[in-house]
Every structure is written in structure tokens, then in C-alpha cells.
Amino acid sequence: MKKVPEVIFVVDGIFEKQALKEANSLKLSSYAIFNTN
């Protein structure tokens, strides 16, 4: 990538835990879809 994205979308927050941590450290907006079942 040439630049850091402004937002990330995550489908499985448990599986993509590292991506969410990195987004948080870069102060990016992140949206995740979780299933409560």
C-alpha cells in the first residue's frame, strides 16, 4: 500500500484481533461484525 487506510472493516473480530490492535494503535476507525450465537 502507498498509504495507510482511513478505516478498516473486520468480519471476524476474534480471528482478526491483531488487525484491530494495529488499527487502534494507528488511531484508525474500525468496524467489526460479530455473531453473538
Image: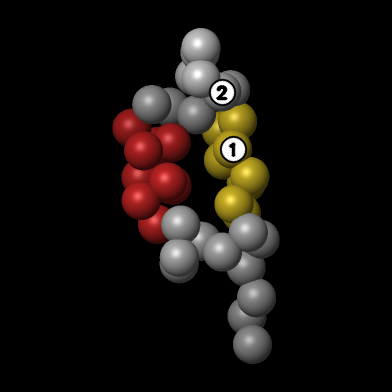
The residue to which callout 1 is attached is: 8
The percent position of residue 14, horizontal first and vertical second, equals 45, 67
Q: Quadrant of residue 11?
A: bottom right
The percent position of residue 33, horizontal first and vertical second, equals 66, 61
Q: What colouring method underlies this structural image?
A: secondary structure
User: Of helix, strand and loop, which one carries label 2?
Assistant: loop
Task: Report the quarter where the C terminus lies.
Answer: bottom right
* Camera-nearest residue between 28 and 5: 5
Q: Amino acid at mark 1?
A: Ile
28 to 8, vertically: above or below: above
Kindly identify the residue that appears in the image at 36 percent across and 38 percent down. 22
Name the mark on residue 28.
Answer: none
The residue to which callout 2 is attached is: 5
Q: Amino acid at mark 2?
A: Pro
The percent position of residue 4, horizontal first and vertical second, equals 49, 19
Kindly identify the residue that appears in the image at 58 percent across and 22 percent down. 6
CB under 8 Å between discs 1 and 2: yes
23 to 26, vertically: above or below: below
The percent position of residue 5, horizontal first and vertical second, equals 56, 23
Kindly identify the residue that appears in the image at 51 percent across and 20 percent down. 1
